[in-house]
Image (cartoon, rainbow, N blue to C red):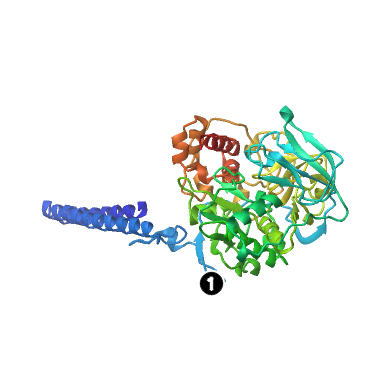
Amino acid sequence: MKNNILYTFLVALFLFSSNTAFAADSGSGSNILNLSLWGLAILVIFFLIIQVSDNLIRIEAKESGLDNKSQASVSLFPSFSNMFSAKKPSYVKEGSFYALKAGHDIALEGIAAKVVNAGAATTYAIQPQNFVGISPIPKVTVAVGDEVKAGDVVCFDKKRPNIKYVAPVSGEVIAVNRGAKRSIKEVVILADKEINYKSFPTLDLANTSREALVNHLLESGAWTMINQRPFGIIPDATDVPKAVFISTFDSAPLAPDLNFVVAGQGAAFQKGLDVLGMLTEGSVHLGLDARGTDAPSTVFTDATGVEKHWFHGKHPVGNVGIQIHHVSPIAGDDKVWTLGVQEVITIGKLFTEGKFDASRIIAVTGAEASTPAYVSTYLGANIGALAGTVGDNVRLVSGDVLSGVQKSKEEFLDFRDDQITTIKEGNEYEMFGWLAPMDARPSVSQTFLSGLVDVTYEANTNTHGEKRAFVVTGQYEKVLPMDIYPQHLMKAIIVNDFERMDGLGINELLEEDVALCEFACTSKQPLQSILREGLEIMREQA
């Protein structure tokens, strides 16, 4: 719309200037000037009529569901952005295609080699702090010295006792570690050399009711694989989502290649999709990767019983929250469930093999990793054992560098993470900061010459500045491909303005969605922490 109005006035101004100049040169005086003014008026009226018609067409298209945010919107006028946007790859045969323009890729050194090594971890943990809304002191059902099988209940939430958290491996419980105010930090299990599984019945989906299906997932612990938006919580057993979303690719820095991870898991992945399809009143949506020259794994492209959506663009294009926003935005009291690819496989194996299989392929990444590669392990593995040999001045991160959590070698991989990142600590003072000549560093700013060339970076944790005045810069909108004003939202959270938070779209976001905004922030604001404070406020009001 803004482009169309600009076109109109540029044309009108050109005609007016040309006619006025002609009138002055020819000496015809006021007659030609009057004719020019009349012509300008007619031209403006004509374009205003066309503009109103164009707006009405857009409104009707949006109400009819024909307006596609990813491509050229229904309009009488093409825009430059649509004329030169990314084209649909030849391998996209079915499903919708979205070419997102906002975002930023951070190319770091230390991508994992396509090799799967045996994980060296011997201890694993369930960490209640990984789950939003759980009681700080859940009911622990095991004691130090107890033997458990994979799938045995370790603890449950006192507020919702039907949601059970189970052991990822078999072995001996060797510690129940506590945190602040005696909260349960982790329940640690020393794994057996050969994992023994608790046996569960394999239900026939065709003859199973939704209620029986939910109860089966609750009893087995597989219900905890589901993450519900808004708020990022495990859903209640009575919740019915309007849709289920699974992103089949990750665009975060050094993220694992899920096409490689899913190899050989096609049957379990499809069974998991079938189960999820019975739990929603809507559809199961797959977000597929359209960024490369080659098609994604056939495990994803040949999946049945799902709606497929192809995404092209820069990070955070792989975030499931971004995909939800463009396909079926969260509004009002909507509930949407999301899962990772390996979490879908865990649910699938419950029905194909009758066991809670928490095995995971984890990418160990980063320039400080001795051998960046994939390792086979189980959910909640010890971080230090997986990372291998690293230096003393290295930070271990459960997850990616933008939204992950700092861990010590003695701590454990977080519940939903499939990546460990090693990065050098940025604890060295830089004289003159960005004013001095420096090595290439990742930045969204074109002030740095390294931003103009295609290079990979050996980054560190230095923030290159401190928290300062929260000023309007327009940086967030350039890296967040959503119809949201993130800076206005953050300020509404800071002042506890509930109505503005709701109106500005807080229910569509989780921390990972604003992580890139935090990276780009000139004011060095902790946007992920601010967003979580706002989500907790809204959850309490719900």
- Is 46 on the left or on the right of 238, as rendered? left
Name the residue nearer the viewer: 134 or 364.
Answer: 134
Relative image position of residue 210 (x, y in whole percent): 58, 57
Tell me, yes or no, if residue 446 can be seen here: no
Residue shown at 51% from the left, 46% from the top: 508
Numbered disc 1: secondary structure: loop
Q: The disc labelled 1 sits on which kind of residue?
A: Lys
- Is 464 on the left or on the right of 182, as rendered? left
Name the residue nearer the viewer: 81 or 333.
Answer: 333
Please identify the quarter of the rendering in which residue 371 is found: bottom right
- Return the residue found at the far top: 181
Residue shown at 70% from the left, 57% from the top: 346
Name the residue nearer the viewer: 387 or 61.
Answer: 61
- Callout count: 1
Residue shown at 60% from the left, 48% from the top: 237
Residue shown at 74% from the left, 35% from the top: 184
Residue linked to disc 1: 93
Disc 1 crowd, CA 10 A, few/some/many (<14, 14-19, 20+):
few
Relative image position of residue 420 (x, y in whole percent): 74, 49
Name the residue nearer the viewer: 187 or 312.
Answer: 187
Tell me, yes or no, if residue 176 can be seen here: yes
Relative image position of residue 18 (x, y in whole percent): 24, 56
Relative image position of residue 426 (x, y in whole percent): 72, 38
Please identify the quarter of the rendering in which residue 158 is found: top right
Please identify the quarter of the rendering in which residue 434 is found: top right
Vertical placement of 399 versus 86: above or below?
above
